[in-house]
């Protein structure tokens, strides 16, 4: 059996350091808002080439707190991708705003910059581009549009730590940038975790206050905040794993290149494609085919794990029935949802495992 993702082996590769980090937190007697969080915030800001980083409880909270810090509120509109994980939309809903979907570029699956301007109205306050599947969106173009219309940008960088757009890191373009350290992410905690990055000190301070009950000084609350703090244990574990992220990224890119070379030219199979001057860290390796369901069934029978990212686009989810979107309203997102399949790719994957995946995919199409 070849798993889709082997988190156990990924984390056991660093088990001694992770155990030491755990012991350090245990022995400290300080488990919330301490030195391990402070160190991780410094380290992650430095890694992501931003001035500031704020550790929060998870990636969805990172998006919500970013919108709150920007004072996005009820009745206002936020432009979102039609093709994304539902968290991008949920964050908009949780602050009372309205998600306004924009279709993706079919080649890259990321939001199409050329389609954004037509969706801007007098109610539009922000854009949330998602760097999907590990690939940086065309962030320079999106920022130019945002600047022209005086809109805020919150990058949803939950899947793309280390990806580049024109040589600049994803997660450093937006006024605020939200990321996730969910265990399955390239930089994964051993539980839920997230962060917000920014170069704006005022927004940085605002997110810090919101995440901690609206308080800078204990028991003195300036605003109605929330409880969304990255705990000391997860921060300590992430400090260990962050050191290995560049090497892990290089390994994922190496494996993706092998897939690119070995699966090229197969009739009826579409491989991942990056936008010009953008790179991917391959959070997933997503292939597309009209025979997706048959291919998934075949690979499962061959002992190869796969995942569909994502089977139902947000506009067709029951959670958003009040928006009255119908099948066919966003055909590109729907086609991607019907054809996409993620095949195994993770650091520690053996050459034999990858070649077996390649051989079985080729066998299916032959």
Image: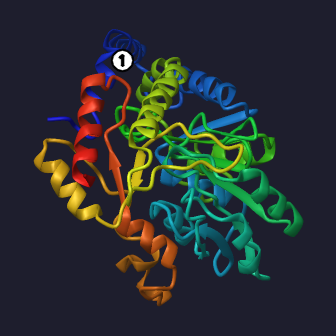
Q: Position of residue 330 (x, y in %)?
A: 51, 79
Q: Nearer the viewer, residue 13 or 299?
A: 299
Residue beneath the point at 50% across and 66% down: 83
Q: Quadrant of the N terminus?
A: top left
Residue 219 picture location, percent across and down: 58, 44
| Placement of 186 over or under 311, stated as above or below | above
Q: Residue 31's image quarter?
A: top left
According to the image, what is the colour scheme of the structure? rainbow
Asked which secondary structure carries label 1, the reply is helix
Determine whether, in the image, residue 44 is placed left or right of residue 318. Answer: right
Q: Residue at x 75, y 48 (%)?
A: 203
Residue extending farthest to the right is 148
Q: Residue at x 67, y 44 (%)?
A: 278
- Residue 227 appears in the rendering: no
Relative height, residue 241 to residue 60 (above, below): above
Residue 140 position, x and y percent, is 78, 51
Q: Position of residue 225 (x, y in %)?
A: 58, 55
**Horizontal relation, residue 214 to residue 317: left or right:** right
Q: Looking at the image, can residue 200 be seen? A: yes
Left or right of residue 321, residue 200 in this image: right
Question: Image check: 128 left or right of 160?
Answer: right
Outermost residue toward the left in this view: 301
From the viewer's perspective, is residue 347 above or below residue 209?
above
- The residue lying at 54 percent from left, 60 percent from top is 109
Query: Which residue carries the number 1 mark?
Result: 22
Q: Nearer the viewer, residue 262 or 227?
A: 262
Bin the neighbour count of mark 1 within 10 Å (Cα to Cα): few under 14, some 14-19, many 20 and up.
Answer: some
- Numbered disc total: 1
């Amino acid at each position: 059996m070849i798993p889709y993702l082997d988190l156990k082996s990924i984390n056991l590769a660093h088990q001694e350091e992770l155990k030491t980090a755990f012991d350090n937190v245990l022995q400290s007697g300080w488990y919330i808002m301490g030195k391990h969080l402070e160190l991780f915030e410094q380290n992650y800001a430095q890694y992501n080439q931003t001035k500031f980083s704020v550790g929060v409880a998870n990636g969805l909270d990172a998006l919500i707190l970013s919108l709150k810090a920007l004072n996005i509120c009820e009745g206002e509109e936020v432009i979102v991708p039609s093709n994304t994980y539902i968290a991008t939309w949920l964050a908009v809903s949780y602050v009372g705003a309205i998600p306004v979907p924009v279709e993706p570029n079919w080649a890259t699956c990321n939001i199409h910059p050329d389609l954004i301007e037509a969706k801007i109205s007098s109610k539009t306050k922000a854009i949330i581009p998602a760097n999907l599947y590990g690939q940086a969106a065309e962030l320079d173009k999106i920022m130019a549009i945002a600047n022209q219309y005086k809109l805020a940008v919150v990058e949803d960088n939950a899947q793309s730590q280390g990806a580049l757009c024109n040589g600049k890191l994803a997660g450093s373009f937006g006024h605020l940038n939200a990321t996730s350290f969910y265990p399955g992410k390239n930089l994964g905690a051993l539980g839920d975790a997230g962060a917000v990055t920014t170069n704006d000190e005022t927004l940085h301070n605002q997110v810090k206050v919101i995440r901690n009950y609206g308080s800078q000084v204990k028991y003195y609350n300036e605003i109605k905040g929330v409880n969304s703090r990255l705990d000391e244990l997860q921060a300590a574990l992430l400090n260990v794993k962050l050191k290995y992220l560049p090497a892990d990224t290089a390994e994922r890119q190496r494996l993706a290149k092998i897939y690119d070379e070995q699966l090229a030219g197969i009739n009826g199979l579409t491989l991942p494609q990056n936008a010009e001057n953008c790179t991917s860290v391959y959070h997933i390796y997503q292939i597309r085919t009209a025979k997706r369901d048959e291919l998934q069934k075949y690979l499962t029978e061959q002992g190869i794990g796969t995942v569909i990212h994502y089977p139902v686009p947000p506009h067709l989810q029951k959670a958003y029935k009040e928006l009255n979107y119908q099948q066919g309203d966003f055909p590109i997102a729907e086609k991607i949802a019907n054809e996409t399949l993620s095949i195994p790719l993770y650091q520690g994957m053996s050459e034999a495992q990858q070649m077996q995946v390649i051989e079985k995919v080729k066998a299916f199409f032959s």
